Image (cartoon, rainbow, N blue to C red):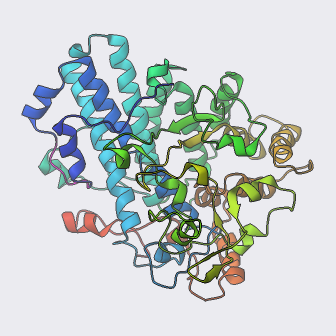
């Protein structure tokens, strides 16, 4: 089945837009815009360019959520970029992962704003009011997606809803978290009202109404988490009852289904959203496109797997991280013996490379060694399920446990469906703590753990207890509330000195 190429090569107007990935960038020039937005195809290519900044999203989840959490004990022999993330260093402002998150998300917002601006100015060139409205809704969904990513990582960020002039860029400060959420919610409400529920084959992978509903439910739930006394993603507003109807609409649609096989959810032969009913929203990748493999393929399958493992099986294309980034003992030993999710998600067999044996476990959920790309380690051919149907079900259970409509039996039924697929016995009287424990194992290596800890209200307690138990090298600093979010990147502080204040604690 054909799917849209979000990373297609388009005109130089978007090449220019991607060259600077910070807020302080000159908007698209008038001549370039005037010569580009002439046909429906131009607007569709511009829409694809907004999707393109999703490309590194799953890698970012590995670097800034999994590695930050109790799922990973990533102390290296040589200090790597992930070490200060894992050990809660206060000196993270210049870290490459932190800089990438801010820059790429704002680049996506810049592209979305440019497209929305051009639809307003030149939308008659699209030729179809229906298509113009859909493209607006897609752009606003993606702008909300990027802003939600930013607010979870950084708290306060600038709210920008149009292409900025240089003067505006140099004077636009950070907005309150509440104002960032106001923009996100408005965008998603527009998207829900104007996105289709399905697409034809040629547009597989575009955002649907259900993807927007799922994202808005996550926004309400993140806002409902505790604020920890910081300007972070939690506002303690108790909006569980607003999230639940959105989740229920997705469930009631009949468009998605719980896959009875856990490995099959992540199978390379189960990629199409029309086949993989677990996929509410996919980030799409395509391997093997001549001359452009690094642009279209994925690299997230090996982000948390070591290069030495690939060398041990005879692959020498430098797949894998520079050193092993081990799964924590705490997570590895938390699985029941019969839990199929451990065998599928965590490599525990050990391996030998160049005479050195490594026995520490690492994540392998996305790896299929029969699918190692021929041309490039950046060309893995598997999609990333950014919003999974199982998550919709478990988020519903979480809302019910927080007092939204529903019963304990509803919660137990959802959790037992997940446990049965994992090969585990049923339980009754599931608590929030048990639900989060089940989520930890279900979504390991999918980037949700740090955000689950934020929302649980127990992040500081859980992380500091984990450090006391896990950190044999005494490398990890005590976790304080300020470290729930990341620092403003140093590049941003330097671009216009005095415009932004650094987040407390950094």
Which quadrant is home to the C terminus?
A: bottom left
**Residue beneath the point at 73% across and 72% down:** 330
Residue 119, visible in the rendered structure: no
Residue placed most toward the observer, 283 or 398: 283
Residue 183, quarter of the rendered image: top left
Give the residue drawn at x 30%, y 44%: 291
Work out which residue is located at the far front of the displayed protein and give it: 314
| Picture coordinates of residue 151, whole percent (x, y) | 45, 53
Q: Residue furthest bottom?
A: 473
Position in image of residue 217 (x %, y %): 59, 38
Asked if residue 25 lies left or right of residue 349, the reply is left
Q: Residue at 46%, 47% (x, y): give it.
A: 148
Instruction: Please report the bounds of the magenta region as a residue range.
Output: 22-27
Prevailing secondary structure of the magenta residues: loop
State the image coordinates of residue 413 (x, y, percent, origin top left).
86, 39
Q: Is residue 292 magenta?
A: no
- Would residue 195 be found to the left or right of residue 252 on screen? left
**Could you tell whether 162 is left or right of 377 in the image?**
left
């Amino acid at each position: 089945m054909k799917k849209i190429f979000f990373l297609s090569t388009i005109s130089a107007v978007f090449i220019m837009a991607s060259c600077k990935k910070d807020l302080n960038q000159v908007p698209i020039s008038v001549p370039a815009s005037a010569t580009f937005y002439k046909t429906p195809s131009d607007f569709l290519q511009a829409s694809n360019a907004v999707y393109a900044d999703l490309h590194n999203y799953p890698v970012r989840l590995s670097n800034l959520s999994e590695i930050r959490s109790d799922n990973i004990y990533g102390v290296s022999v040589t200090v790597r970029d992930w070490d200060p993330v894992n050990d809660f260093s206060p000196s993270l402002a210049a870290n490459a992962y932190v800089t990438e998150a801010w820059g790429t998300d704002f680049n996506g917002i810049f592209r979305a704003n440019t497209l929305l601006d051009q639809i307003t100015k030149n939308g008659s060139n699209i030729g179809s009011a229906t298509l113009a409205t859909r493209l607006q809704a897609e752009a606003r969904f993606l702008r909300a997606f990027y802003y939600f990513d930013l607010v979870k990582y950084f708290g306060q960020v600038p709210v920008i809803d149009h292409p900025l002039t240089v003067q505006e860029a140099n004077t636009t400060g950070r907005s309150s978290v509440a104002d960032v959420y106001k923009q996100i919610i408005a965008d998603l409400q527009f998207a829900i009202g104007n996105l289709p529920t399905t697409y034809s084959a040629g547009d597989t992978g575009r955002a649907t109404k259900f993807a927007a509903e799922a994202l808005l439910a996550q926004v309400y739930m993140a806002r409902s988490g505790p604020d920890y006394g910081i300007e972070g993603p939690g506002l303690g507003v108790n909006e569980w009852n607003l999230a639940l109807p959105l989740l229920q609409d997705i469930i009631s649609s009949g468009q998605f289904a719980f896959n009875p096989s856990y490995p099959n959810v992540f199978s390379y032969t189960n990629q199409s959203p029309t086949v993989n009913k677990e996929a509410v929203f996919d980030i799409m990748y395509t391997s093997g496109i001549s001359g452009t493999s690094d642009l279209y393929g994925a690299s997230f399958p090996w982000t948390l797997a070591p290069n030495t493992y690939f060398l041990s099986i005879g692959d020498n294309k430098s797949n894998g991280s520079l050193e092993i980034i081990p799964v924590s003992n705490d997570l590895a030993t938390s699985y029941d013996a019969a839990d199929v999710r451990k065998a599928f998600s965590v490599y525990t067999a050990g391996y030998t490379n160049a005479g050195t044996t490594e026995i520490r476990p690492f994540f392998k959920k996305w790896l299929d060694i029969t699918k190692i790309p021929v041309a490039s380690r950046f060309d893995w051919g598997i999609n990333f399920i950014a919003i999974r149907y199982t998550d919709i079900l478990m988020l519903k259970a979480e809302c019910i446990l927080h007092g939204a409509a529903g019963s304990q039996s509803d919660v137990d039924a959802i959790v037992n469906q997940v446990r049965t697929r994992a090969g585990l016995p049923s339980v009754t009287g599931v608590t929030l703590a048990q639900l989060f424990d089940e989520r930890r194992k279900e979504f390991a290596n999918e980037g949700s753990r740090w955000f689950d800890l934020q929302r649980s209200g127990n992040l500081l307690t859980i992380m500091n207890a984990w450090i006391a138990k896990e950190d044999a090298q005494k490398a990890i600093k005590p976790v304080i509330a300020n470290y729930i979010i990341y620092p403003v990147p140093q590049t941003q502080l330097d671009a216009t000195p005095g415009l932004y204040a650094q987040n407390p604690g950094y």
